[in-house]
Image: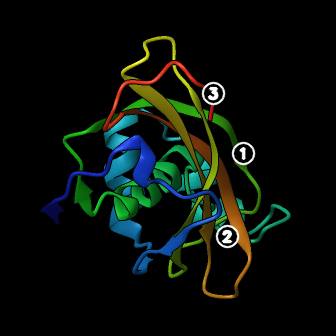
Amino acid sequence: MHFESIFFEDYILNDKRTTLGRTITETDFVVHAGHTGDFFPHHMDAEWCKTQPFGQRIAHGTMIFAIGIGLTASIINPEAFSKGYDRLRFVKPVFIGDTIHAEVTISEKSDAKKPEFGTVVEHVKMINQHGEVVLVADHILLAKRKEITTQSI
């Protein structure tokens, strides 16, 4: 993790970066359940899950989102901040022992309400060890401009 100033103009459409991986553990399940209060049997009851379609416990979608987004947080950019996430979808289940990584693609750039900023959208995909997309979301950033302009991008 390091500091790097990345201004609105520095973001290039379709630029992609890939993170390192992270293996999901049973401890992750227990800690996340404790943090959120989500002790549903789908996540916590191995015997009950054997009777269900997936045959095993499935990870909390919110946990995979949190861990995956954490993987993307390798640069501290003092010129931008997160406005949030849109279009979050849990595409496939994640199981204990799966390893996920994130692919981040700059998918949109546009003017912001304040002319000294621009909006950047990073399309984020969480991918498992089989190359399957398990989660997608759009991360919305507000990034400072190097120069204030009133022109569209």
The residue that mark 2 highlights is 56
Which structural element holds mark 2?
Answer: loop
x, y percentage for residue 149?
45, 24
Q: Does residue 116 lie above or below 145 as drawn?
A: above
Task: Between residue 30 and residue 87, name the one nearer to us.
Answer: 87
Mark 2 and mark 1: Cα distance apart in space: 21 Å
x, y percentage for residue 67?
40, 58
The residue that mark 3 highlights is 152
Q: Does residue 126 lie above or below 144 as drawn?
A: below
Counting other residues with Cα less than 10 Å from the Cα at mark 3, is it few (<14), some (14-19), or many (20 or more)? few
Q: Given this view, does label 3 or label 1 mark the residue nearer the observer?
A: 3
What is the number of the mark on residue 89? 1
Q: Quadrant of residue 59?
A: bottom right
Of the image marks 3 and 1, the number of the one nearer the N terminus:
1
Which structural element holds mark 3?
Answer: loop
Q: Amino acid at mark 3?
A: Ser
Q: Residue at x 17, y 66 (%)?
A: 1
Of the image marks 2 and 1, the number of the one nearer the N terminus:
2
Q: Residue at x 61, y 86 (%)?
A: 129
Q: Amino acid at mark 2?
A: Gln
x, y percentage for residue 63?
47, 50
